[in-house]
Image (tube, helix red, strand yellow):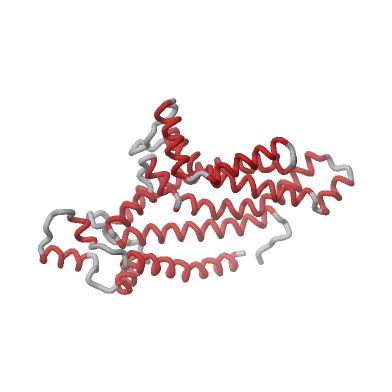
Amino acid sequence: MWGYIARRLLQTIPVVLGATLLIYAMVFLQPGDPIVALFGEKPVSETARAQIEAQYHLDQPFIIQWLLFLKGAMVGDFGLSYSGQPVSDLIARALPVTFQLAFMALVIEAVLGVIAGFYAGLRRGKIFDSTMLVVSLVVIAIPIFVLGFTMQLVFGVQLGWVPPTVGGNVTFTNLVLPAVVLGLVSFAYVLRLTRTSVIENLGADHVRTALAHGVPRTKVNRRHVLRNSMIPVVTYLGADLGTLMGGAVVTEGIFNINGIGNLAYQAILRGENPTVVSVVTVMVLIYVVMSLLVDLLYAALDPRIRYV
């Protein structure tokens, strides 16, 4: 198994290099002058401009900037933001907030989606199944920013059950509503994926054999149907954690959460290459780790799978 893990880690090297190079090229080609964005309407002297360009390597081609970034990133140094703060410190403050938000959304979509999808699959064609299909379709059809603003208005402003914005007061209670908004769309996909997998496994040979031998239906559903149905769901959930963290930009903007998505959005507006590429690098690494954990979980869900 350790050899498999080592091979997977080696495969991530070109992924990280390609992702950072691509985002560096996109930021470099972005129209506008980052120095002008930094100073706003204030005049910038040629001396100050030259010092800033030399400090942040803005006078170098983007390929040189990228190589210098990789050199620092290998030792954990992501450079300085245009405000003079270490980018690693900015990420260290923002990443736990977004990770907590994404993890709460993942738990919500996993628990509710698997339970609803499992019972919908068992009751195929019944009222509960039809209701869940309609609900999931409606959730998928509504854009996330519409869901966010609507739930913020109803539950935060009109009913007052939760604070409408989070700001610097990051607590479990304050993140419940943003987590629900962030996880709603994925909840619909998990529900549909679980339902489809359950229906498929209900007709499998090993399920019919177990029932023919007199094994109780509840035990068969729990041990054989649900367990085998979780393999594609776990694959989706593992990749979805990275997707939730990357897609938290809209949710964090609606609820004013100082997370990694908000940090990346502000850095893109200011043209801060080191901050943007550093955030992307961290997100790619999270994707890689989650993908590796999902592969290892396969062996626990399906005894036929072993990594030699």
Q: Quadrant of residue 73?
A: bottom left
Q: Quadrant of residue 164?
A: top left
What percent of the width, then of the height, locates residue 278? 36, 60
Residue at the (43%, 48%) spot, across then down? 248
Q: Quadrant of the C terminus?
A: bottom right
Residue displayed at 35% across by 48% down:
93
**In the displayed structure, would residue 305 be above or below residue 251?**
below
> In the picture shown, does residue 35 fall above or below 176?
below
Q: Residue 307: percent from the left, percent from the top?
A: 65, 64
Compared to 155, does 142 lie above or below? below
Front residue of this view, candidates 122 and 241 = 122
Q: Which residue is drawn at 56% across and 69% down?
A: 7
Q: In this view, does 190 lie to the left or right of 44?
A: right
Place of residue 284 in the rendered image (x, y in percent of width and height, measured from the top left): 46, 60
Judging depth in this view, the residue of 86 and 252 nearest the camera is 252
Residue located farthest toward the right when viewing the structure as drawn? 213
Horizontal side of 168 relative to 184 (left or right) equals left
Quadrant in which the N terminus is drawn: bottom right
Q: How many marks?
A: 0
Q: Position of residue 59 (x, y in %)?
A: 22, 71
The reply, left or right, for residue 126 in relation to residue 145 is right
